[in-house]
Structures are given as structure tokens and as C-alpha cells.
Amino acid sequence: MSTPRFESIRDIPLFADMAQESFDALTRGSYVQNFPPNMVMISEGETPDFLHIVQSGCVELFSTWSNRETSVTTLYENSTFILAATIKDQLILTSARTLQKSRIIMIPSENVRSVFKTDPEFAMAIVEELSRCYRATIKNMKNLKLRTSLERLANYLLKQHRRQGDVLEYQLPIEKRRLASYLGMTPENLSRAFNNLKPYGVAVDGQTITITDMATLVAFAKPDILID
């Protein structure tokens, strides 16, 4: 596949400042693959053969242990995943599956490690990306450890409100059972939490969220730049 097929990702911060020659070397042997919904693309414990980039669609990172499963995060367009495992050439810590039809760009891990050593702009971009992911992990840990389940849900709804253009009515981007797992709750507890948020200005109808009193919801959630 020729490099022009990958120009759609050239403006992603991870690749934006690297030399064109490096970008050509990076994408050599890369390819694009379409995956149907609910397709597991990689499994934790595998070695990272490719760096994955979500060109379109939605991907969930998840993990299992002792017959239990938890959702780690949900990724959307232009997100990369298993970057740390790719750079370190170590086992993948999370599995990945599509939540909807998705188009994924797959770049050979050997290419990533090779160009990392020769292109300083790409190396710096990787450091910045891994730093961002580290800070996001710390924030998520603080969210889980410092907030009640009801506070976590309230702040998640506010985050989606901002992500979807500050609209007061929107659709949850993931199924409620996956949302419960992501927030460290059971589906039953999530259902009760939605009911308990009604006095704070939240109405729920299936996947549709309507914020009826923003000031009250914000006062309850207390969003914090050091967590959110």
C-alpha cells in the first residue's frame, strides 16, 4: 500500500511533525482493515505486532481476570492504542474489540521502534502521547478512588455533555452495561444511580440523557481539573 493511503493520519499529533521520509518508512508495510461490531482485534497477553489507529468507528479496551471483565476505556477516531507495548515490545495489557463497525490502520511495531530511534520529532511526540496517557490513567484512578459511584456517573454525564457539543440532550456513546463496568459499578447499581440523579437535573430514557438542571448537576458533581 502506498503512503498516500495514510495521509488521513498525517495531522494526528503523533505524526504531524515527523519528517516525510520517516513517515514513509513508518507506514511501509502498513494496511487498513475494516472490522465488524463486537470483533476482538487483539487479546491481552499477546505480543504487539502492530500499532493500531482508529480511523473511524469506536473501540473498547477491556481486561478479564478470574471470570471477571472490566472496561478500561473507549476510543474514537484518531486514537492510537497499545503504543506503550509497541515501544517496549512487551505483552499487551488489555484486549481490544470494536463497539461498532470500525476502520483501523495497523502499523508494524518494528517500523514504530525503528523510526522512534531515528526521528527526534516522532520520538518527542511519542513521549508526549505516553505522558498524556499516564496522566489520564492517574486521573481515572483518582476518579475511582475518591468519588462515590453517583459522583462518578454525574461527572461522566457532564464530560459527555461537553464532548458532544454542550448539548443538553444526547445519546450515551456506549451500552449501559459497558458504562457500568467503566465506572466500576454493576448494571443494577448503575440503574439505581440514574434514578438517584433525577433530583440533580438528569432525566434518562433508554440511551437518551437529558440534563434538565445544569447548575444543580454541576454543584453536585463538583468537576475538578485535577481529575476530569
Image: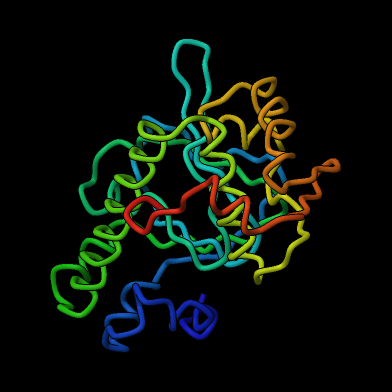
Quadrant where the C terminus sits is bottom left
Location of residue 53 in the rendering, given as x and y in whole percent from the top left corner:
48, 62
Location of residue 87 in the rendering, given as x and y in whole percent from the top left corner:
23, 54
Rendered image coloring scheme: rainbow
Vertical position of residue 104 compared to residue 134: above or below: below
Vertical position of residue 160 compared to residue 16: above or below: above
Location of residue 147 in the rendering, given as x and y in whole percent from the top left corner:
43, 34
Image quadrant of residue 128?
bottom left
User: Which residue is painted at 62% across and 58% down in the image?
Assistant: 215
Q: Nearer the viewer, residue 42 or 124?
A: 124
User: Which residue is painted at 84% across and 41% down in the image?
Assistant: 206
Residue at the limit of the structure toward the bottom, as seen here: 20
Q: Nearer the viewer, residue 107 or 99?
A: 99
Q: Nearer the viewer, residue 17 or 146?
A: 146
Q: Is residue 105 left or right of residue 102?
A: left
Q: Nearer the viewer, residue 76 or 162?
A: 162
